[in-house]
């Protein structure tokens, strides 16, 4: 399998949270496609975070684009050249107020490699203890909730977690739990 050759790029939108470019590409075999659209997003982190008691920390928040109240794993955008492991710890402290004894990288996923270029790094954290109050961004309104492992498995079976990357992260996290 050969990669496509990028011949040219033009930016249509350049904003803080999303950038849209159109590429002209040459496919193997010589076909030229002059309108391949690519969304550039910042990279993200997701956390499968367990309290000292072994409960999984989740957050519930409104997601405007889908117009849903979504049950999710904590996480967020990696700031600039911030290391993913630092970003996940920062996001957890900001969103939940919890600090953790261990932090292990368990997965790297592309949200949609057909149309976007960003990656999501998933971490497995244990020994969580509430050490701070939440420190949310101005647009964040979220509730912190704790679930047993069996409750999370049931939420997945019942299709109660709508964010696909978070379901994938939970599967990686549940597999990590089986190793303990």
Image (cartoon, rainbow, N blue to C red):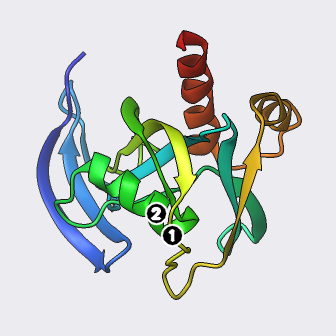
Could you tell whether 86 is left or right of 112 in the image? left
- Horizontal and vertical percent position of residue 81: 16, 60
Which residue occupies 38% across, 54% down? 89
Q: Secondary structure at mark 2?
A: helix
Is residue 109 visible to us here?
no
Q: Secondary structure at mark 1?
A: loop
In the displayed structure, would residue 145 be above or below residue 175?
Answer: below
- Horizontal and vertical percent position of residue 33: 28, 47
41 or 155: nearer the eye?
155
The N terminus lies in quadrant? top left
42 or 51: nearer the eye?
51
User: On the image, which quarter does residue 54 sit in?
Assistant: top right
Which residue occupies 37% across, 61% down? 90
Q: Residue furthest top?
A: 179
In the displayed structure, would residue 172 be above or below residue 108?
Answer: above
Could you tell whether 105 is left or right of 147 in the image? left
- The residue that label 2 is drawn on is 93
Could you tell whether 49 is left or right of 21 in the image? right
| Whether label 2 touches label 1, CB < 8 Å | yes
Q: Residues within 10 Å of mark 2 (few under 14, many from 20)?
A: many
User: On the image, which quarter does residue 21 sit in?
Assistant: bottom left
- Mark found first going from the N terminus, 2 or 1: 2
Q: Residue furthest left?
A: 7
- Horizontal and vertical percent position of residue 2: 20, 21
Q: Residue furthest right?
A: 158
- The residue that label 1 is drawn on is 132
In the displayed structure, would residue 25 be above or below residue 19?
Answer: above
Q: How far separated are the C-alphas under marks 2 and 1?
A: 7 Å
Is residue 122 visible to us here?
yes
């Amino acid at each position: 399998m050969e990669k496509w050759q990028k011949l040219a790029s033009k930016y249509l939108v350049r904003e803080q949270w999303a950038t849209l470019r159109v590429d002209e590409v040459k496919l193997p075999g010589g076909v030229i496609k002059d309108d391949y659209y690519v969304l550039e997003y910042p990279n993200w982190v997701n956390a499968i975070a367990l309290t000292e008691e072994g409960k999984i920390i989740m957050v519930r928040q409104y997601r405007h684009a889908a117009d849903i109240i979504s049950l999710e794993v904590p996480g967020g955008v990696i700031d600039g050249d911030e290391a993913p492991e630092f970003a996940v710890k920062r996001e957890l402290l900001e969103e939940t107020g919890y600090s953790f004894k261990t932090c292990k990288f368990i997965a790297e996923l592309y949200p949609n490699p057909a149309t976007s270029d960003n990656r999501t790094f998933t971490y497995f954290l244990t020994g969580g203890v509430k050490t701070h109050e939440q420190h949310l961004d101005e647009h964040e309104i979220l509730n912190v909730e704790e679930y047993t492992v069996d409750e999370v498995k049931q939420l997945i079976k019942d299709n109660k977690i709508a964010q696909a990357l978070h379901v994938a992260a939970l599967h990686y996290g549940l597999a990590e739990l089986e190793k303990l």
